[in-house]
Amino acid sequence: MTRTLAGALLASTVLLAPFAGAEAQQRPPEKKVGPYDPIGLRRGAFLIYPSADAGVAYDSNIYADDQDEEDIILTVAPAVRADSQWSRHALSVGLDAEGAAYVDHDESSYLDASVFGEGRFDVRRGSYAFGNARVGRIHEDRASPDDAGQDEVTNLFSYDANLGYRYAFNRFYVQPNVRATRLDFEDGDENFRDRNRLGAGLRLGLALSPLTRVFTEVAYDIVRYDDTTRVNRDSDGLAARVGAELELSALFSGEVAVGYTRREYDSSALDTAQGPSAEGALTYSLSELTSFTGRVSAGVEETTVAFDGDLATADVRTEISLEANHELRRNILLNGEVGYVHDDFDGTSRADDTFYAGAGAEYLLNRLFSLKGSYRYSTRSSDSNAAEYDRHLLFVGVSAHL
C-alpha cells in the first residue's frame, strides 16, 4: 500500500550499498512492446511515461504498535519518467508523488513528492561515468523503530546524490564512488536527528568471463549531526567486502557481497559498532513466466532508539527476503514475498524480530488501465512491549499509464 521511502533512505547507512555495480555501458536490445505494455509518449530523443495509481487500503494497525488502531486509507500516486533513447549514453529524469488520506485519523495523512535523475556517460567500451540524485519530501514509516510514536506522521526532506566512474582495462576494472546524503526533519522535536553523510568508496574487479566478475571494495564515510548537545552521534565508518557480479545464464543473474563494517563514535558514551556486512540480490528465472529473487542485507545503521535508560549506539540490522513473480496469463500477473528482519540495538538489551509475508495480483485490462490488489501481513516481537505488533494491510486499486 505505502512505499516506505523514508525507511529505505534511513537504511541507506549500510556503507557499501552506494557502491553496487552500475549499468552496463551498452544499452541492451530494446524489449519488444507487448499488447499490454505502455508505449510512452515520444518527445524528441526521449520516451515519456506518465502513470497514476489510486486505491483504497485497510490497515489494521496504523501506528505499528501494541494499540491496534485501524483505519481506511484513500491513496493516490502519480508519476512521470522520461528515458533517453540515444544509442550511446543514457539519461532518465522524473518525479513521483504519493498521497494518503486517513478516514478517521487525519493526523496520519501524508503527501510525499520527489524529483530524481540518473545518467550514464559512455567514454569507451567498458568505461563510463554514472550518477544519480533524488530530492524529496517524504515521511517516516510507522514500522520504523525510530518512529517517534506521535499521533502526527513524521515528515522530512531527503537529499541524496551519487557519482562514480568505471574504468575497464583488459579483464580488470576500477570503480571509484562518492555519495552525499542529507536528512532534514520538519518537526522541531525531531531536529536532533538532522544529519549529513559523506562517503567515498573504491571497487576493484576482475572479469572471469564475459558474464562473471569478482571484486573487492572498501568504503569510508562520515556522519555529522546538526545537534550534538543531547548526545554526540557524529561518527566515522569503514567497511570492506568481497563479492561477485553474476550473469551465469539468461536464467540466473545478480550481485552479492559480504564483508565487515566498523563505526566509531565521537562520544565516549557510545561504544564502537561493528559486525559482518552483506548486500546482494540474485534472480532465478524458472521460465519466461516465473522468476524468484532472493535478497540479503546486513550492516550497521543509524538509530536514536533508547531502551531501559540506555542509548543505542547503532542498529545492527539483518534482512533476508524472497520474492516470486508469475505471469498466469499475459494480462494476469501474480506476486508474493516473505521476509525476516532482525534489529539488534547495540548498547541496549533490546532486539526486534520482524516477519512479513504478502501476495498480490494485477489484471491488465488493456494498454492503459489495470486493476491491482494486495495483502501483506507483518508481525514484530521485541524486548520493548510497546514495539510489538501484528499488522494486516489490504489494498485494491486501479492503475493508469501511457
Image: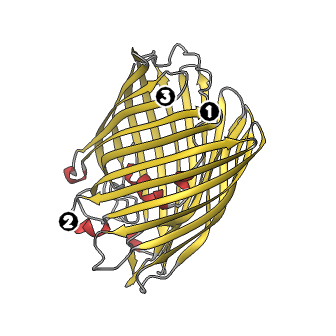
- Say what amino acid the circle numbered 2 marks: Gly
Identify the mark nearer the N-term, 1 or 3.
1
Image check: 258 left or right of 106? Answer: right
**Residue at point 33%, 58% (across, down):** 183
Q: Quick check: can you spot residue 343? A: no
Identify the mark nearer the N-term, 2 or 1.
1
According to the picture, the residue beneath numbered tag 3 turns out to be 362
Q: Nearer the viewer, residue 26 or 125?
A: 125
Image check: 222 left or right of 324? Answer: left
- Say what amino acid the circle numbered 1 marks: Arg
Q: Distance between the residues labelled 3 and 2?
A: 41 Å
**Residue at point 35%, 41% (across, down):** 57
Label 3: few (<14), some (14–19) or many (≥20) C-alpha neighbours in 10 Å: many
Q: Are marks 1 and 3 in contact (CB under 8 Å)?
A: no
Quick one: SS at disc 2? helix
According to the picture, the residue beneath numbered tag 2 turns out to be 188
Identify the mark nearer the N-term, 3 or 2.
2
**Residue at point 40%, 37% (across, down):** 117
